[in-house]
Image: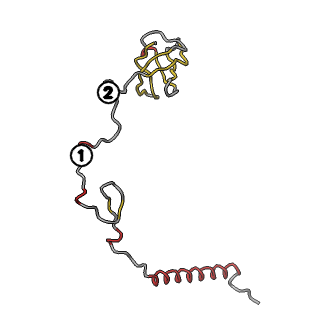
Amino acid sequence: MAKSQQSWNKKEREKKKQKEKQDKAEKMQERRSAGGGSKSLEDMMAYIDEDGNIVDSPPDPAKRKEVNIDDIVIGVPKRVEGEEGFSARMGIISFFNEGKGFGFIRDLQTGESIFVHVNNASGPLKENQKVSFETEKGPRGLSAVNVKIE
């Protein structure tokens, strides 16, 4: 007697495929009968109002605001010494190697550690000295410049 060519797993897979096809056809029929057909272009449009919010109605031309293109600033403006609010930072030298001529200043305001080199100081530096300084971007992070002993 010959065995059946289809195994139990094969029959189950075929049943599953047929069930998925039937479910898909039923869902498609439901969508068609629901009448939720395609929307018109006007229904899909979105507009930006005068405050920058997304709305579904066109903006009122009477409320339109004119913007001068020169007034738009992209980025952060650089700090200039003459501006108000600019001041030297205060800190304490937390580590200084006199042999190599470098160390670190602990900023009193932010608590961050800033690199300092002896060439950027007005006098000899020692640990636990209170100093005032300015910062600039160095190759490995912030560096203290114009270091003055207080």
Please report the residue visible at 35 percent of the width from the left and 37 percent of the height from the top: 76
Taking depth in this image into account, of 31 and 108 the one nearest to the observer is 108
Q: Nearer the viewer, mark 2 or mark 1?
A: 2
Q: Position of residue 1 (x, y in %)?
A: 77, 90
Q: Residue 16 appears in which quarter of the rendering?
A: bottom right
Residue found at the far front of this picture: 62
Callout 2 amino acid: Glu
Provide the residue designation for mark 2: 83
Q: Disc 2 on helix, strand or loop? A: loop
Residue found at the far bottom of this picture: 1
Please report the residue visible at 49 percent of the width from the left and 84 percent of the height from the top: 29
Q: Position of residue 104 (x, y in %)?
A: 51, 20
| Disc 2: CA contacts within 10 A as few (<14), some (14-19) or many (>=20) | few
Please report the residue visible at 51 percent of the width from the left and 18 percent of the height from the top: 92
Q: Find residue 116 and name its label.
A: none
Looking at the image, is mark 2 or mark 1 earlier in the sequence?
Answer: 1
Please report the residue visible at 36 percent of the width from the left and 60 percent of the height from the top: 54
Q: Is residue 93 above or below residue 18?
A: above
Q: Find residue 69 and name its label.
A: 1
Q: Is residue 144 left or right of residue 23?
A: left
Q: Disc 1 on helix, strand or loop? A: helix
